[in-house]
Structures are given as C-alpha cells and as structure tokens.
Image (cartoon, rainbow, N blue to C red):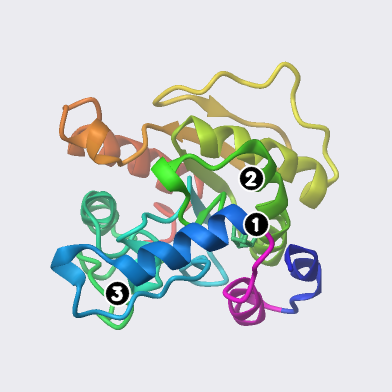
Amino acid sequence: MAARAPRAADLSELDAAVADCFACPRLVAWREEVAEVRRAAFRDQVYWGRPVPGFGPADARIAILGLAPAAHGGNRTGRIFTGDRSGDVLFAALHRAGLANQPTSVAADDGLELRHTRIAAAVRCAPPDNKPTPAERDTCAPWLHREIELIRPTLRVVVTLGAFAWAAWWPTLRQVYGVRPPTPRPVFGHGAHWSCDAVPQVLGCYHVSQQNTFTGRLTPTMLDEVFARARSLAGLDELH
Ligand code: SF4
C-alpha cells in the first residue's frame, strides 16, 4: 500500500501505484460509497472513486499542497481540484499567473496543462466532511514524500493551501531532505513565509474552499499575490 511509495521510479509509476492504494479502511469505504451513491447532478457519470494522484510536470519548481480530494470533485473526475468550485478558483488563478494553459478544470481529459507547477494533496482519498484523521494523514505521507523526492531537483517553493497542508509539510523536510523540521513549527497564516537553506521555501495561503472564497476571506487578488510571490521565489520571473 503506501509502503510501496518509495519504490516508484518516476511520477507515472507513483501515480499509478497510489491510485491502487487501500491502506485506510475508513477512507476506502467513503470514497467508494460516494462513487456509488453519487450526487444527483452527476448521476449519469462514472465516478473515479479511488485515490487521486498529483498533477503537473516532473520538473515543477512550485508545489501546491492541498488537503484532500473533494468527494464530488477529484473523487469524481480522478484529477485533483478538478470538477468543483475550489478548482474553479484555483485554476483561474494559476492561469492568471501563467502557471496553467487554461483557466478551467472540468474533467481529466479537458486539455489542462500546468507549467512549472505540481499539485498534490496531503491525503489522497476523499474524507468524510473533508476531515482526515491524523492517523490517515500519517498513513498517506509516504506518497507525498516520494512525490517530493521525485521533483526535488527543481522544486523551489511549496504553497500550502490551509493549515492542514501547512502542518503536513514539515515531516517532509526530514524524510526527503534530511533536515530537522523547525521547532516550534512556524504558525500558519495567509501570506506566511518560511525559508531555510537548501530546502524549498514555504508559503501559506488560505484554502480555496467555498467557505473561504464565497465569504471573501480569500479573494482573487489575494491568490494572485501568493502566486506572484511563488513565481518570484521560484525564479520563474527570470526565465520569461
Ligand atoms: S488516504 Fe492515502 S494511504 Fe489512505 S488509502 Fe488513500 S491513498 Fe492510501
């Protein structure tokens, strides 16, 4: 299961292996139940109903780390942040930042391509109420660690969407980079920035959930500022 993650030789092998993971009984049951029952609007669709791999090129300089796939978004379409309102907001912002070739993300075969950017979730199966347990986060961590290891040569910046992803990042420092995570842990906040020699810099961003975007807690301008900063820290502005 997740113990197979370290053996994946490249991202395509990792993506294929994670899609076949059954390590968390509660999440396996939930992702399959949602795929079976479906939402009325998608009743004629076949849900993915499996773990959702990361998405984006292997030479990414920026990693975007989310919480977990949405029950009727990634768990339906098979691609992270695809087919839900959170994704609408995120990909529109990535397109404005020049990090995506189109502003929409509706299905796995819609032609979307990311530039210099890889998106992954800290937990790869849709959890009930969008709330994975700490044990599920830890069980899933080897998938994240191997993914980061595979993009390590180019990775410069990690944008964490929300406090859960922010907290899930720190063990990666030890597992992938052999660096002791900071103690106490840096406090999450929108615009929070952490840096240390020889490891990716970390930016905090409020999650693109409807709860944040519908209430104005997170605006398109705030997202534009985060991705402009990520581009700059990743050295992308010098490339183009
Ligand atoms: S959450 Fe992660 S470890 Fe658990 S079943 Fe899904 S992919 Fe496997």
Instruction: Locate the C terminus and report the quarter of the image it occupies.
Output: bottom left
The earlier-in-sequence mark between 1 and 2 is 1
Q: What residue range appears in magenta? A: 10-24
Q: Quadrant of residue 22?
A: bottom right
Q: Secondary structure at mark 3?
A: loop
Q: Residue at x 63, y 40 (%)?
A: 169
Q: Which residue has dot 3 on it?
A: 112
**Relative to the observer, which residue lies in front, 209 or 233?**
209
The earlier-in-sequence mark between 2 and 3 is 3
Q: Nearer the viewer, mark 2 or mark 3?
A: 2
Disc 2: CA contacts within 10 A as few (<14), some (14-19) or many (>=20): many
The answer to whether residue 51 is magenta is no
Ligand number 1: quarter of image: bottom right
Q: Residue at x 49, y 34 (%)?
A: 203
**Relative to the observer, which residue lies in front, 53 or 91?**
53
Q: Is residue 227 left or right of residue 22?
A: left
Q: Secondary structure at mark 2?
A: helix
User: Residue 98, image x and y in percent?
Assistant: 29, 59
User: Residue 219, image x and y in percent?
Assistant: 20, 33
Q: Quadrant of residue 168?
A: top right
**Which label sits on residue 24?**
1
Q: Does mark 1's beta carbon lie closer than 8 Å to ligand 1?
A: yes
Q: Secondary structure at mark 1?
A: loop
